Every structure is written in C-alpha cells, then in structure tokens.
Amino acid sequence: MKISKESWPILIVSNQFDTRNDESFRLRELAHELETEHGCKIVPCLSYEDAIELLLSRTDFGALVIDWDINRTNPAAKHSPASVLSAIRKRNPKIPVFLLTDWLEASDIPLEVINQLTGCLWKTSDTIEFLAGRIERHLVKYVKGLYPPFFGKLIDYSEEYKYAWHTPGHMGGTGFLRNPSGVALFKFFGENIFRSDLSISAPELGSLLDHSGVTGDAERNSARVFGADLTYYVLNGTSNVNQIIWRSIALPDDVVFVDRNCHKSLNYAMVNADAYPIYMKPRRNRWGIMGPVKLSELSEKSVAQKIKKSKIIPADLRPKTLKIAAITNSTYDGVCYNVKKLKRALEPISDNLHFDEAWYAYAKFYPIYDGFFGMTQDETTPTTPPIYVAQSTHKLLTAFSQASMLHVKNGGSRKINPDELNEAYMMHASTSPQYNMIASLDVATQMMEDSGESMWKDVIMMAIGLRKTVAKIAAELKSRNPNDWFFEIWQPRKVKVDKEILNFENVPTQYLATSQSAWILNSCDDWHGFEEIEDGYAMLDPIKLTFITPGINPDGSLSEMGIPAAVVTNYLLEEGIVCEKTDYYSFLLLNSLGTNRAKQETLLSALLHFKNLYDANAPMEEAMPAFTQKNPKYKGIGLKDHCRAMHEFIKERKMLELMHKSFDLLPDQAMKPTQAYRNVVKKNVELVELKDMFGRIPAVMIVPYPPGIPMLMGGEVLNKKSKAVFDYLKARESFENKFCGYESEIHGIEKIERDGKIRFCTMCIKQ
Ligand SMILES: *Cc1c(COP(=O)(O)O)cnc(C)c1O
C-alpha cells in the first residue's frame, strides 16, 4: 500500500522554532530533513496548550514530537509535556509520540511518561538523518496499521487493478470519461471511489455472499467488537436486515409478536412471512413520546389472551409460544430498554428475539448504556432464545448510506447455523456488493474499537451541555417573569447527586455523562409523563433531544397558548437546521459523531431568535420569508397569530386526543397482512376517498408522519372500533387544507386534488 505521508502531518511541539541557538538550528534542520528527504509534512506548534487544542480537534497527525523543556524558557505555562501526552493517549493509544530531550534531562522524566512514549530523541547526540528516519519509520508503521484488513486489501487491490475485463462496466472509472456528463460525475466523486468499485470476481477480497476471505474476516471482527456470535454485513439497510431475520424464522401460520412502534420494513417482513401477527402497544405520554411496551403486555397470560382474541387465528392454530418477538430499541424518541428485564419477560413466550436497533449501534461502546442494548452480555440457560439485532451502521456510526449489520447471539441450546441463515441472507442480497460500503463497515468497526468510548463521550458531553443550556435559559427567563416561555427538553428536572438533589442545569456534566441512574425512568418521577412505568426498565438516551414547545398542560389538555412544533421546525429549516422528526408539540434532534459546538450555537441562537420573533408577533414574511413566499396566504399575519390559529385548530378538532386514541386501540383484523397484499397483486383493490372509507379494509398500512407508527395495518378494518383513526385522518385532511405548507407524509395515503381541495385516498380491498 502506498501511503501519502503528506496527509499524515507530524506535529512538533517546541518553542525553539524561531530562536537563534544550537538547539533551534537542529530542530529546523530536522523539520527540513523530514520534509525534503522523506516527503513528510510538519505542523509546528509553539506551546503545550496549543498542542492540546490541536489534538482535541484533529485526528490526522501521523506522529507527535514533543520538546521536553518548553517550560524552562516559559515558566508561566500551565501545561506540561505529560499533560499533552495524556491528552493524546486518552484518545489514541497507537500514534507514535517522541520526546525531544537530551541526555542530561532524561533522568528527570517520570516513568509513567516514558511508559507512554514511542521513544526519546536526543537533541544533540544523534544525527539528523537518524532522527528523521526513525520518526518516518514509525509514522509509516502507524498509518499502515490504521487500515483494517478488508479496507487495506481493497486499497492494495485497487492500486493494482488496471487491466480488468470484468464488471462494473465503468472499469475503474475510465468508462465515464467517454462523455462529458460522465466526466462531470467522475470529477465530482473522485477517482478512488471508482477504482475501488470492484466486481465480485476479485478473488483476493473474498466474498460477501459466502462470508469468505478478508470480507468474512471483517465480518468476524465486527462480531467480536459488537459482542455477537455472528455478524453479517447487509448492504441494503436495516430494512433488509429485518427481512432476512424474519425470512430465516417465520413461516405461514406461525404467530409472531410485533411492536406496533416498528419500522415499516417489519410490516413487509410480516407480509412476506405470511404469519399471523399479534401486537404490542408502546405506551405514549401526553406529548406523544413513545415509551417502552408495558411488561404486563409481555406476560404469558396477556399473550394467550391476544391470541385468543384475534379474529383471524384459527383455534387449532393457537400456538404455545410465539415464533419471534420484535422490539424497536430504542424507541423513536430515544427510550432504551433494559434488555435483561425484557429478555426475562420474553424468554418464556417467544422462540426468537429480535431487537431493531437501527438508531442505536453505538450503545455497546459507552458504559452509560450498559445492559440496555441487544448484544448485552447476559447469562444463558438452555431455554435462552437466539437474539437477532439489526443496526443501521450508517445512521449513527460512520458508514455509507444503506450499510447495516445483522448481529446474532446464539440461544442457550439453539446455535444458529450460519449456512441456514445464509440462505435467507442470499434471498435479500445482490450478487454485486458495493465494496466501498463493506470498507466503510470495516472502518466503522475499527473506529469503535479504537476510540469508541472517547468519541461517544464527546458526543454525550456535548448533548448534555446543550440540554443544560436550554434548561438554564428557560429557568432564567422564568425567574424574571413566571409567565415567560422557552423551549424545554424532555429530561429529568432534578437529579440526585450523592445525597443532594440538584436542578438538572446545575448537575456537573461529567456526572450526567457517567451516571446511568440519572437517565433511568422511574415510577416516582413525573417528568417523563408515563404512567405505571416499571422501575429500572427504561432509560432516556442522552444524545436524543426531544424539544417540547408550549401547548400541552400537565394533565394532557391543550393550554391557552400553544406553539405547534411544525412552525418551529419550518422556521429552523429556513435557518438551515434540519430536524429528525416533528410531532405536534415536540421535535427531535439527534446528536451524533458529526455534531459540533458550532452547530449547537447555531441552533440555540435560532431558537432564541424564534422566541423574539414570536413574542413580537413579527409578520410571517419577516419571520419565515422563504416559507411565506411559497405560501403567500400567510402574508401579513403575525407569527404569534399564526401559531395561535394552528393551535386552536388542533384543539378544536381534538387532533391530539384522536391521535392518542388511534394509537391506543388495536383495530380488528379482517385478514392476515399477507392476504391483504395478495389482493393488491390480484388487482382486487381500488382507490377510495377518505370520506367513503368508513367500513372499508385498506390493503396497505397507514402510517402518519409524525410519528411514523402504523395506525392501521393492511387488512385491518376501519369500523366502529377504529373510528378514532377515521376521525383523526379526517381532521388531518382538514388541517392540510387549511394550513398549506404544513403537509406531511402519510404512508398509505395518496393525496389527490379535486375542486381545489386536497383529498386523502387509500387503496382498499374491493367490496
Ligand atoms: C431506519 C430504520 C430502519 C431501516 O433502516 P435502513 O438502514 O434505512 O434500511 C429499520 N428500523 C428502524 C427502527 C428504523 O428507524
């Protein structure tokens, strides 16, 4: 592998660059030698303070050289070489670090410093050539070690790959160069993307489809790092991981247990499996935030009842245990399950457990989540079922979009046979895998193994910092005027630190970042708004921030004043801030490895700015110019009046209440979801307008965003029992007609325009 040494600069920390003495002369000579003879790049740095700053913000150094005695000439300096060393070693145990010193000083260097060094460079006694050579050798060795096996091999191969006669047809990118549009694409993405875009006929790289060679090694390495017995890389997202899991387990007429708060891919998995579903209902609080499924719903008795009550499962097919139980962990709002408690509940009732952890692949790497993720180490008994975990590595770790992982833990007495599982895998895999995506999964694994904990600590500390700042601003505004308002974040208001109870904003960030107990939902607390929560069963994920806007009273009724979250998130959009999810009076923002302080500052100032505009009832064209230009009917209306009008509408039409009711009911099933889909294939379906839909059976699921939870599955009936769903959809239809610009996606609903009005339609089974 060729290494570009220029891309891995050497940080030299010394205050001798500009002085005129022997030492500084040799230092400049050394830097010169490294640059001219070895092709290295030098980043000079004059103080230990600056070095620490640099090491916290950059991770691309190839080696570090620290002058031992900057302090001799600058006794006021706060930091020492030891503090620079400790700053870098906490984050990077492998980078070569040299101390620049001389024989006489060497005896003063403490042993713990020497222990963490790659070596000492003698300022005066060794030749410059020797010193430079030594640094360069270590740099190259270090940088080569940064490429995990698959990624390394991919680079080697793409460097050789010149005269190939196989697919992909662009052959290392050259195919694009035959036409200017192709050239534009090639130039945009850069050569390496194409050189490493290879065909499966490259034998040196092994095969993803039979998990062999370096590809298989990379998967096995990920299994070790993520705590699984078996890991497969899946290149078409967790949507497909979920499908593969179910394909390998569920058969027609099996009874399966599905979290209603699940991703749509699970519904499709269910359709493919032709199984009978029974459902778990996640609980919701007054803001519509999704909490954990009640443990009582997972009891043998409750499950037996659900099966018995099902209108479609024939009595002679009622099973003793369920084939698989699938839970979304964490919920969309960042509520994570205590997996041990969940397993104890599910073990007696389900043959297989499935945790959909699409947004949660980092949990293994930071101790605050201990015990709250699917691959948690736990004792196994002969009856422990196999556990399947689906993770979108691309969502919150670092991988190309669609790059996901399937992790499996063997059951106590049932080991998963990889060959059998692979049959299901192949049914959903392409025979032309994207090697760059595999490399990104390989590297994501290495990143987590090497510095997962320190990276996530940064993210968590930053998220907590923002949580505290928002709480502080709100508290300050309230202390000046009890009727004033600000956004709140859904989080504990008080935290017990040792024996003291402190307001959240006054708790040390370090404490919050390391104490799981601060984030656990307990029955004695009221901040979370969930009734009868089981103690220690769920925790809030610190990095997922649900902002709450004014509008809902503690008893769940709508208050006098209200600011619908959709107005805020549309405003934020104009400021270039994109939210993950918008509900009626809350919106969700995610912190990830890509979050930084500048982003947070931008958000805070935008929120404060919104408040000012709202309080001043600024005209819409001033507050949200782009939005108002697109939707001129809001011109001349004040932002506050606009919010009030929307709030009143939501209140009048009881939208929130209807939504709660809709999610709280389980509609009657007329048929299996599979059968509903078969009607689509047979063209035994028609588009029906919402006004005519009462009494009908939609063939497809209806999933409103927000919150992205199915209200109705395909094959479920819109009848008296599910009237709330019907009424909610009617209210939403009126809402969208009245508040143009605020349309949101509802999966399963087609919106047509007739007589200048939006009308909701759904594909229903013909009568
Ligand atoms: C996004 C998501 C998926 C699908 O993941 P992709 O990698 O986008 O296919 C599955 N489950 C949940 C809970 C998700 O949020």
Image (cartoon, helix red, strand yellow):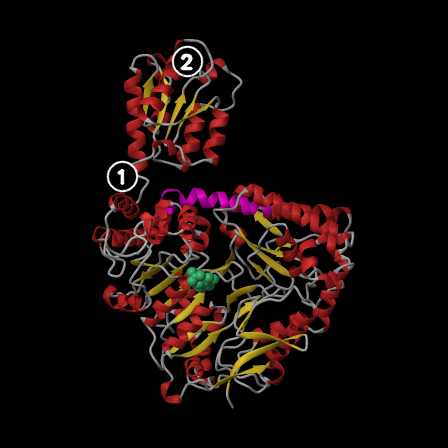
Q: Position of residue 517 (x, y in %)?
A: 51, 52
Please give the residue where the numbered disc 1 appears in the rendered image. Answer: 1
Tell me the residue at 30%/20% (across/down): 131
738 magenta-colored = no
Label 2 belongs to which residue? 24
Q: Quadrant of the N terminus?
A: top left
Q: Is residue 636 left or right of residue 66?
A: right
Mark 2 neighbour density, 10 Å: few (under 14) some (14–19) many (20 or more): some
Q: Nearer the viewer, residue 128 or 246?
A: 128
Q: Nearer the viewer, residue 117 or 177?
A: 177
Q: Nearer the viewer, residue 713 or 572?
A: 572
**Which stretch did the figure color magenta?**
446-466
**Place of residue 552 in the rendered image (x, y in percent of width and height, measured from the top left):** 69, 63
Q: Is residue 738 above or below residue 159?
A: below
Quarter assignment of residue 639: bottom right
In the visual, does 62 lie left or right of 711? left
Q: Secondary structure at mark 1?
A: loop
On the question of residue 483 being in view, the answer is no
